[in-house]
Every structure is written in structure tokens, then in C-alpha cells.
Image (cartoon, helix red, strand yellow):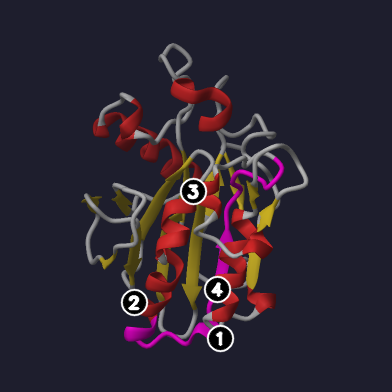
Amino acid sequence: MIYYTVKIFENQPGITAGVTRANRQMVNTDERIPGLNFGENTGITLEKVTSSIGILEKKIGTSSGHALAEQVHGNKVTFVNNGGYYPGYDGLITDQNNLLLGIKIADCAALLISDPKTGLIAATHAGWRGAAGGIAEQTLEELSKRGADPEQLYIYMSPCISVKNFEIGEEVASQFPDSFIDRSIGKKPHLDLKGFIRHTLMEYGVQSKRIEVDDRCTVENTSFYSFRREREQAGRMLAFI
């Protein structure tokens, strides 16, 4: 198994979604960062990333095109009709069949979104900067502009760093409501990123029962890459839909 499947989309025909594992002992074992690494920002080429996507597509059983966001920890979202690499964006939306949307993660969260009524899907990168900057709201706004009803969306939030391991400085804590800052764990504040993003989605109108939050922590679960744990030796997983 090179990727974890997503339960919330199981009853939606035509939707395939998941999060890859690091697969350090299975793929590219002789690389500086072994495993199924999708991070062109880790010193590998886009050609190598494309090769990894080919491995993933073979396991999925498709040879679809793929669209990847560069991810700059911002809040820009774009609609795409074709595969390719999209510099400057943290979120992608499409209504095209057989187009894989991919978001790189290694402690940040990814949101995978499906609207069965319109056929729209989306993939968004939400680290603390993006979350504070409104990336989730911007994604939902762009979906709404294209006819999606937030109450009808299904959303998966990928594994990411847990509140226990997300120590931050006061300059970061000041950008979030106190209810998502835990000051009981250590000397510095800790951020509940998953809780904040989930709250944001529900404030926008997404139903709680239609949100699946993966409770695995990328820092603690070594089947994932983790930048906080591995620093420059961390590759990037792919959250895809």
C-alpha cells in the first residue's frame, strides 16, 4: 500500500482520493531523500516528481493528467482545465474528469473537496500561514462562484502536525483565536491547526458530518515525511483527488 485511502468519498462514483506514504524502503531507495517524494522544493526535479506520479497512477489504475500547485503558503486559488504545474497557487479547482489534483504536504494540512452535484473537485494547501490568511475561505468562495453549495460539499483534511507537536511563537499565536491556542503543553504556545481549519469550514456553512479529519500526526507517524522531525531530509507526500 503506497497510499492511504479516504473514507468520506467512498460512496461517490468516479472520485479517487488519498494521501501517499513516504515509502522510504520501497521507492527511490538510493536517493538523498528516499521514498515516493513529490517535493520539487526538496532538490529533486519536476521530472522526478512526474515519475513518482506515474508510480501512483499505476497503483490507482489511471493514466490521467495531473495538476500540481507550487504552494507558496498564500491564499491564491485557481480553476484549471488542464494538467500542469501552477506557480504561485496554493489551491486548485477543476470540473474535468480524469484530472488528478495534487497538494504536497510534510506537516501542513491538505484539504480535498468534492461536490457531487456540480462535479467540482478541489485540493488546497493549508499550513498555518495559509490558514491564517484565509485559504480555506478562498477555496470555498471560488467553489461557490461556480455553483457549489457549501452545505453539499464533502471535505477531507489530511494528516498534519498535531497540537501536541505544533509549538509556535507568540507572533504566530496572535494570528489565531485563543480557543485554538494551547498554553498547557510547554513553555511556548501550541496551535490546533486541524481544529482551526475545521471551525473555519463550518463557519462558512460546511456540515460537520461531511468533514473527515484525519487524526494522524505527521510528526509522530513515521510512515509520513515530516519537516519538523526530519528537517532538510524530509520529502513531501501527495494528497490527491
Q: Quadrant of residue 119?
A: bottom left
Q: Is residue 43 left or right of residue 112?
A: left
Q: Is residue 146 visible?
A: no
- Residues rendered magenta in the picture: 144-164
Image location of residue 106, percent across then percent down: 50, 38
Specify which label sits upstream in the sequence, 1 or 3. 1
The span from disc 3 to disc 2 (Cα, nearest Å) is 29 Å
Q: Are marks 1 and 3 in contact (CB under 8 Å)?
A: no
Residue 156: % across, % down: 58, 62
N-terminal of the two: label 3 or label 4?
3
**Which residue is drawn at the image coordinates 31% and 69% (left, top)?**
96
Q: Residue 201 — which label?
A: 4
Q: Which residue is disc 1 drawn over?
A: 151
Q: Is residue 133 above or below residue 63?
A: below
Residue under label 2, please give it.
142
Kind of residue at badge 1: Glu
Horizontal side, residue 88 vs residue 25: left or right = left
Q: CA distance from mark 4 to mark 2?
A: 14 Å
**Which residue occupies 59% across, 65% down?**
177
Q: Quadrant of residue 220?
A: top right
- Dot 3: element: helix
Viewer-nearest of discs 3 and 2: 3
Q: Which residue is mark 3?
A: 171
